[in-house]
Amino acid sequence: MSKFWSKRTHELSPYTAGEQPQDQQYTKLNTNENPYPPSPLAIEAMRAASGEAMRLYPDPNSFELKKAISEYYSVWTDQVFVGNSSDEVLAHAFVALLKHSKPLLFPDISYSFYPSYCKLFDINYKQVPLADDFTIDLNDYSEATADEVGSIIFPNPNAPTGIALTLVEIEKILKANPESPVVIDEAYVDFGARTAISLVNDYPNLLVTQTFSKSRSLAGLRVGFAIGSVEMIEALERVKNSFNAYPLDRAAIAGAAASIKDRAYFQESCSRIIKTRERVSDDLSDLGFTVLPSKANFVFAKPEKNAEKLYLDLKENGVLVRYFNAPRINGFLRITIGTDEDMDVFMGKLKQLL
Amino acid sequence: MSKFWSKRTHELSPYTAGEQPQDQQYTKLNTNENPYPPSPLAIEAMRAASGEAMRLYPDPNSFELKKAISEYYSVWTDQVFVGNSSDEVLAHAFVALLKHSKPLLFPDISYSFYPSYCKLFDINYKQVPLADDFTIDLNDYSEATADEVGSIIFPNPNAPTGIALTLVEIEKILKANPESPVVIDEAYVDFGARTAISLVNDYPNLLVTQTFSKSRSLAGLRVGFAIGSVEMIEALERVKNSFNAYPLDRAAIAGAAASIKDRAYFQESCSRIIKTRERVSDDLSDLGFTVLPSKANFVFAKPEKNAEKLYLDLKENGVLVRYFNAPRINGFLRITIGTDEDMDVFMGKLKQLL
């Protein structure tokens, strides 16, 4: 607290990231990182960009990267926005598109950064409870049936549940809210859900955000993007150019562009994680866990005994998972899918502890 | 314009960066980039960081970099804040420290991003005219003599004038505004002005920001920082953790830390630019320009003939400088100091055109 702080600064509720121990001694299954390295082509591109040209500003429009993304998803380059992680892209979307006099709706159990953005940008919001089975009830997100809708955001698959909506369900939400911007945060979409990018040309109220941190193994590079109609993207560009004109460095532009071009590597890496996830889900069920059906690179699972104690016991035994001390989900653990070897270590420790 | 945009988005005045032609055919003296490459140790560190570890999130606290900066400036690590360019650091400072009910003061001729931040964050601001010789009048920045002071920001040296205040003058401003946060934007300080970092322990209202883009030849890497009292830094951390928990990628943390440790390379590179600046200033005066006394890596100079035409003629002849079509300064050109060879090309073209 300080007289020099703005009123807003006193009111903030900063986000708490998962632990990032710097000693690297853990089997680290707590922040949804990809266990496989980035594409060798991405590594080569980052290193090539990290030379004497670093004395020059990067392209403020990151055109090389926008072009690679637009070709991958068959959209125009001016339908693509890029930023310093999908967290930054989301932050700009909260200011540009989600702040209206009527409330922003999002699920009560969801990405825990959303309320932090709302406090920072003074956004009126309403957390809508998930159903008892942790699914989104479509009727809760409709200009006709909900009390008031200013805008909508939800992750698909949702986090930390891992449960995904189908494209048919997403289209119902878009149709039920023609006056309201709808942002779909697809951080985990590449592990078995379907992207809504195919809908952006039909629904001008839709913005889809994605990240290079999960399926593309580039959490350390900080690159995210959004795809939508030209008018949605223009709103993000206006905010970006009022905040930081050059958010992506030269290595980030080059590395992310190379990564998205390496389709074979990407598909192989996602397939391996999906296969491991299905095995681990079955094994956890066999041990008595309630496992939510995940389309992400993590599983959200409820042990028969105390989840917080199990989290602490696992940590003491060198395995980090994520525990949220929050209503409705404090009986669960969120377990990132690592390599098969990582998961064997995890399951081995788990069997000792149960 | 769109019904999906927030009210704020409609009201923005986005910043316009200097031209960044991607064909690289120009003698580029328009965006104050350093003509010398970054330290070889920085290049080595960026490349080493750009490997398989990119699959993992970076340290959200960028401790390695904070430590290197704190050792260089003899402050504590919790007096250091780092961000994705000094533009991002400034953006957070505008929200965290410069937004109050009384107005933020800054010079009418100054970094043109400041009004963009004010529009984005709805900050009450007042632009204070520089004196006729383009210096800051200290009496204009005082809780006792100015009408109202909520907070203060100015670059030192100022941009685009290049004129610097002395530490004694800065101390007078700090003493005259004990209730108001004062941010000094030292993007260009290493080319001959003196940093106010030595004052942070005496003045709890002081925050100093700097960048790796100019004196450290890392414009392409996007790293900036701030130094102040622990309470000033805590305000920035609160905003940062409500916006983007991991703004610096692995290569940025490693490259910037290596750069700041390479003191000899840094001093040599700055000395060369200062020497070239002094020569170019003299040569421009000889050609009839009015040259403001610069402590930056650029000179702000007024030709006897039409400045806009000269800017366009230079561009047509392959030399890019910066022209601002704004009141009071539309007779000037801002010329970045390049290598001696760059400046010989510039002076040669200039002599042909005058």
Image (cartoon, coloured by chain):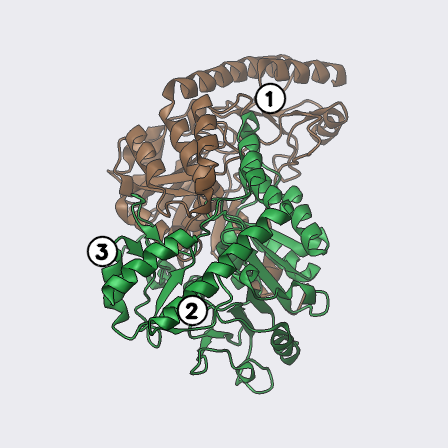
Chain colours: A brown, B green
When asked about the image quadrant of residue B15, the answer is bottom left
- In the rendered image, which residue does mark 1 sit on? A290
- In the rendered image, which residue does mark 3 sit on? B316
- Along the viewing direction, whichever of B133 and B200 lies nearer the viewer: B133
Q: Which mark is residue A27?
A: none
Q: Is residue B11 left or right of residue A270?
A: left
SS at circle 1? strand
Q: How many marks?
A: 3
Asked whether residue B134 is in view, the answer is yes
- Look at discs 3 and 1 and give the one toward the viewer: 3
When asked about the image quadrant of residue B108, the answer is bottom left
Q: Position of residue B188 (x, y in %)?
A: 52, 61
When asked about the image quadrant of residue A287, the answer is top right
Q: Earlier in the sequence, mark 3 or mark 2?
A: 2
Q: To which chain does the residue with label 3 belong?
A: B
Q: To which chain does the residue with label 2 belong?
A: B
Which residue lies most toward the bottom here?
B145
User: Distance of mark 3 from mark 2, alpha carbons?
Assistant: 25 Å
- In the rendered image, which residue does mark 2 sit on? B282
Q: Amino acid at mark 2?
A: Asp
